[in-house]
Structures are given as C-alpha cells and as structure tokens.
Amino acid sequence: MTIRVFVPCDTTALAMGADDVAQRLLDEAEQRGLTVEVVRNGSRGACWLEPLVEVETADGRQAYGPVGAEDIPALLDQGLLEGKREHALALGKVDDISWLANQQRFTFARAGITDPLSLDDYLAHDGFRGLEQALELDAQAIVDEIKASGLRGRGGAAFPTGIKWQTVLDTPAEQKYIVCNADEGDSGTFADRMVMECDPYMLIEGMVIAGLAVGATQGYIYVRSEYPLSCRMLNVAIERAEAAGYLGDDLRDSGRRFHLEVRMGAGAYICGEETSLLESLEGKRGLVRFKPPLPAIEGLFGQPTVVNNVLSLAAVPFILDKGGAAYAEVGMGRSRGTLVVQLAGNVKRGGLIELAFGTSLRQVMEDFGGGTYSGRPLRAVQVGGPLGAYLPASQWDLPLDYEAFSGDNAVLGHGGVVMFDDSVDMAEQARFSMEFCKVESCGKCTPCRIGSTRGVEVIDRIRHNQSREANLALLGELCDTMVDGSLCAMGSMTPIPVQSALTHFPGDFLRTVQQSAQANAEGEPS
C-alpha cells in the first residue's frame, strides 16, 4: 500500500530545509523497501513548525515538526508512516493542533491541505465554485454580492472593495483591467506570498470573477521581485487553468473571456502604492501619480482599472460561493469577515493566523505567538508594516478592527505584527523608520524626499545629545510637514512610527547612542 506523506513546498518551508527532508524521506523509503508518495503541499502557516511533515492515516493526517533531514531515519524507526506518536517531534492530528484549530479560516481554508498546483485538488475542495456562480449572474449582481459582504481592501487602506468595483463598472470604456497588487513589501508580512504559493488558483479565480464584475478582459499580477517561487507557481497555475477553460477566450463555454499575466516587480517599496505600481507596470519608473483621476477611472494605460491586494481578491471566491451575507456574519463594526495576521519579529510561535475581526492584539501575541522568542518581556509591537505605529502595553488590548486602531493613533494595515522585547532601543527604531523612507522614497515630492533625509539627521543629533530640546521640537515640526505635504502615504505615514516612539518611549530619546549600546551589551532593558 502506498502511503502519502506531505512536505510543504513554499518559500518558508524551503528555507528551513523542506527539499532535503523530502529527498531524505524518499531515499530512506527506497532503502527500506517502503512505498511512499511524497506530496508537496502548501504550508499551513505555522512557520515555527516548519518543515511540518504530515502522514495520511485512517485516523486523519498526523503531524510532525519541525522536521530536519537528519530526523527522518529515527522517525521511520518509530512509526512515522503508521502515524505513531512515539517520537518527540510527533504533534498528533493536524486538525487538533490548537494553534490551527482556534483560527477561523475562510481565505486559507485549503492552505496546507492541497497540492497548490493540482487543479483536481482545488476542484475537490470547493475550487471554482465561486466562478461558476458568477457566470450565472450579471455584472451588477456580482458587485452587489461584494458590497453585501463588507469586504474592504486588505492592502492597508481598507477601502470598500464593492465601491471600487462599482466605479469601474460604471465607467464606460472599451478596455478595462484587473491589477493584483502582490508587491508585498511591508516588514513582517508574507500572507500574499502564501496565497500565491499555497493556493494560487484561488487568486486566479478571484481575478476572473472581478473581471466578470466590471467588464475587464485582461488581468495582471504584479509580484515583488523577491518572490521568484511565487512567480513560477503562478505561471504554472495560469497555464493549467487556461487548458481547463477557467481562463482564456471562452470561460467554461460561456462566451466570455479573461486573460491573465504575471509581471515581476522592480524591487522598489514605493511600487506597493497603486499608482506607482501602474507606472511600473507600464514600463516606466515607479513614481506616484497625482490624484484625481483615480485608477478606477483612469488607471493602467489610461483605462478604468481595479487595483486590489492579493488578500482582497483571494476572499472573492468564498463570497461568491457562500454568499456575501455568510462572509459578513463574522467580524465587528465596519470590519467584516476575517483578518489575516502575520506574526513576526521576536516571537516564539511566528506564522500566519486568520481570525475574525475583533480579536485583541494581546490575544494574538500571547495565545498564538506565545510571547517573545528570547523569553524576555515584550516591550513594543509594530502593527501595519514599517509605517505603522509602535504600540506600548497600554494599547495591546485594542481589538483588531480598522476603526478601533485608527481611533487610537494606530495602523492595522496589511496585518503584519512585529514584536520587540525589552532590549529594543526605540530611538533607533524611530531612526530606522526615517531612514527607510529616505531609501525607498520615489523622490517626486519634497516633504518625503527631503523630509526623511533631514529626519535621519535630526534624530542622530538628538541621540548624540546635540541641542536635544531644540532638535526634538524640530523633529515634531518636520513630522507635521511630512504628514500634511506629502503626495502619498509613503511620506505622510513615515512620521507615525516616529511620533509613536516619541510619545510612548520618550526615555529612549534621552539616552545617547553610547549609553544604549552599553545597556544592550550588559543585557539591561532599554
């Protein structure tokens, strides 16, 4: 009897040695005369357990992790292929692992279960059911379903997806486009990559439905240059979807068409901003455009364009399959459905977690993250990428909700959560935020281009105790200028982490660089 063993194939698992694990398993099985089929599945998002090896048994899939290639002989000796739990790496049934069982997975329901490139696997797990429903509806009915779901952009701005689609639908044009923003550059974020590498057909299905909804016939997925595996997997999935009639000139014999291409990004953080992305997609330098006009009216090549994040489009198949009301049943306030949280930084159990909006930040960090990896007290957490605020303990009970965060001078953004223990120097983190803007600014507007450069210099003077009070006042004025005068969110949001560090961790700005370095060397909290 052939026994199926699952070894993840996404970037995280590969970085942790998944290919070596899979090969060692095949080699050992051959030497022992065992019949084993190794399935390269997607990751379940439990990065702290990668490579997570699963064995198919009559009692369900049994998990072992994190497994190294050197562990395979002992695991086989102790009943790996029978799903026995004698080895120290045995975790029991995958479905019973509390870290996974306590999530609410809508978008990532298939991740880790299926072979990402198997169309049969995708279809066997409700794949393309949303598209089949969409093909039975007219464009307005599809848009109405998205509106009913309450789906908002998952890239950071949280703009209602249905309103954006309605604008493109109502704008007459012979050619319209669907553009997927997969230029995932925020620190501590990897959910977009996991969609593309663990369930690429879901993204394809979402983009086809979007095309049907607004009358677009061409789509592009703009993938960040650091994701070569995502590009390769998407291209294979697109080729197979075309062969099966889910892409092309005649979608499932409906007479409607939609074509899709993958384009690799230019390696610039600013291209995560939608208008800069469109410039890059057109073959130009990634510079921010003035608004208006909005991309929904004049976007790619001057035509009406839907620009959505990967997670926004990936939620669409569920909504069309189960109904907008089913998606809107969970969440809180105006934040409906689920939020994909990505835990990173100094965290014991890092990975991807999908939960209904409304769960507290503290619950995510403690119940799922398990505290800091170092074992030291948690001091600060940055939510929403490198332009998000640094949050002290007094803000950790905030519910994960766009309005709750913005109402307390915080940013939820793309759902990235980066944790810091008590050895962190928050003045240094503030400097990093300014320097990040200095390096990544497109340079089109003066407040961002010059303001970030001067910001680094002012923070350096503060940290070297040069006219500290005067420079603290100057830093505040500089931040206000960047907020009010920058052309896009790059410049207007850079002051957010700086101002939060000044507000919540002022003592760190009263210490010199030498004092901070000495404290860290002696193991004292900053």
Image (cartoon, grey):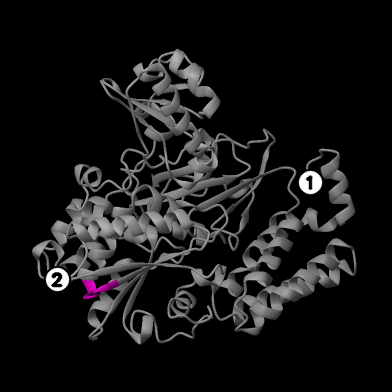
Comparing marks 2 and 1, which lies closer to the viewer?
2
Residue 288: give x, y in percent of width and height: 52, 80
Secondary structure category for the residue under label 1: loop
Magenta region, residue range:
213-218
Mark-to-mark CA distance, 2 and 1: 61 Å
Residue 125: give x, y in percent of width and height: 22, 43
User: What residue did someone put label 2 on?
Assistant: 256
Q: Name which residue lies at 24% across and 46% down.
A: 122
Closest to the observer: 507 or 9? 9
The amino acid type, in three-letter code, at marker 1 is Ser
Q: Earlier in the sequence, mark 2 or mark 1?
A: 2
In magenta stretch: residue 122 = no
Q: Quadrant of residue 210?
A: bottom left
Q: Say left or right for 162 vs 462.
A: left
Q: Say left or right for 389 vs 176.
A: right
Q: Say left or right for 186 vs 129.
A: right
In the image, residue 347 sits, relative to residue 501, either above or below, namely above
Q: Quadrant of residue 76?
A: top left
Secondary structure category for the residue under label 2: loop
User: What residue did someone put label 1 on?
Assistant: 526
Residue 184: give x, y in percent of width and height: 49, 60
- Tell me if mark 2 has few (under 14), some (14-19) or many (20+) residues whose alpha carbon lies within 10 angstroms of its own: some
The amino acid type, in three-letter code, at marker 2 is Arg
Closest to the observer: 403 or 144? 144
In the image, residue 87 sits, relative to residue 25, either above or below, namely above
Q: Name which residue lies at 78% across and 42% down.
A: 525
Q: Is residue 147 visible?
A: no
In the image, residue 326 sits, relative to residue 450, either above or below, namely above
CB contact under 8 Å: marks 2 and 1: no
Q: Residue 316: give its label.
A: none
Query: In this figure, what is the number of numbered marks?
Result: 2
In the image, residue 345 sits, relative to residue 178, either above or below, namely above
